[in-house]
Image (cartoon, rainbow, N blue to C red):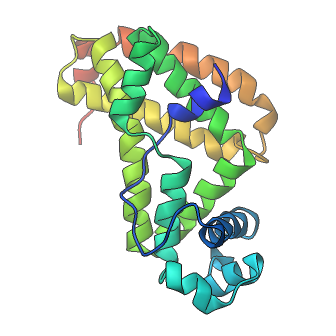
Amino acid sequence: MTNQQAHQAKLVAPSRPGIYSRGSDTVDAILRAALHVLIEEGASAFTLRRIATECGLKVGNVSRHFPRKEMLVQVLLEELLSPNAGEVRSYLKEAGRTPEESLAIVIGGSLDEISTKKMTHLFTELWAMANHNEFVAERVEMVYRFTHGLIASFVAELNPALSPGEVEIVSVYISATIEGSTVVAGYGRLCSDLMPQIRAIAIKQLVAFAKNVTPEEIRALPSV
């Protein structure tokens, strides 16, 4: 699959906030600067003043378009992760993909993204911001909710014997496995050189698990 196809199997962000004109040179410069600061310098440097300096503007020019840095976070998520679940499912279905192939594409595409500096650093810093900012936490949660919902839709098709609650358990496990790899095998991490093997194992094992796990096996698991 192409990089564009992998990207289309990714995430969604909420509706556009703030007062700005997407496509204008000024707004494009602000967004590029904001992304650069967040990825290269981290959440602690992500201020309107620092972003203004990065793009050669006055703080007032930045705040005119984005009065709060949270608005920048929301728009960055939208710009990077724009498709919605229906669009992704339609795209995969129109391409003639089976549920098994579609789930493999979502898993592989997600791990491909995790292998990039942009996504590994971006989400690491967003997690850090989310610990102290409820607005950012809600937006990040929406991103993961989208991915989880997309995975769940394919799990339900692959394994119709599972109840909605059982599909939820399987899908959360798959999502957690994918995202957990960021810490140890994402860009620049300790085991990043092993990501191709991890990706291949994840696709094979997680798709097989989703397809073959039985309701009885899930019901036998300990409950809270």
Residue 85 shown left or right of residue 81 in the figure: left
> Which quadrant would the C terminus be assigned to in this image?
top left
Q: Residue at the location (42% across, 38% down)?
A: 147
Q: Hey, which quadrant is residue 3 in on the image?
A: top right
Residue 50 percent across, percent down from the top left: 70, 83
Rendering coords of residue 66 (x, y %) = 50, 78
Number of labels in the image equals 0
In terms of image quadrants, where is residue 25? bottom right
- Does 160 appear above or below 21? above
Q: Is residue 211 above or below residue 141?
A: above
Whether residue 177 sits left or right of residue 94 in the image: it is right
**Residue under the point 43% across and 23% down:** 91
- Residue at 81% x, 33% y is 193
Residue 178, by quadrant, is top right
Depth check: give the residue in front, 83 or 57. Answer: 57
Q: Position of residue 89 (x, y in %)?
A: 38, 25
Which one is nearer the viewer's eye here, 15 or 147? 15
Q: Nearer the viewer, residue 26 or 68?
A: 26
In this rendering, the answer to whether 163 lies above or below 177 is above
Q: Looking at the figure, which quarter contains the N terminus?
A: top right
The residue at 44%/67% (across/down) is: 136
Q: Examine the rendering and report whether any part of residue 54 can be seen.
A: yes
Residue 63 falls left or right of residue 224: right
Q: Is residue 171 visible?
A: no
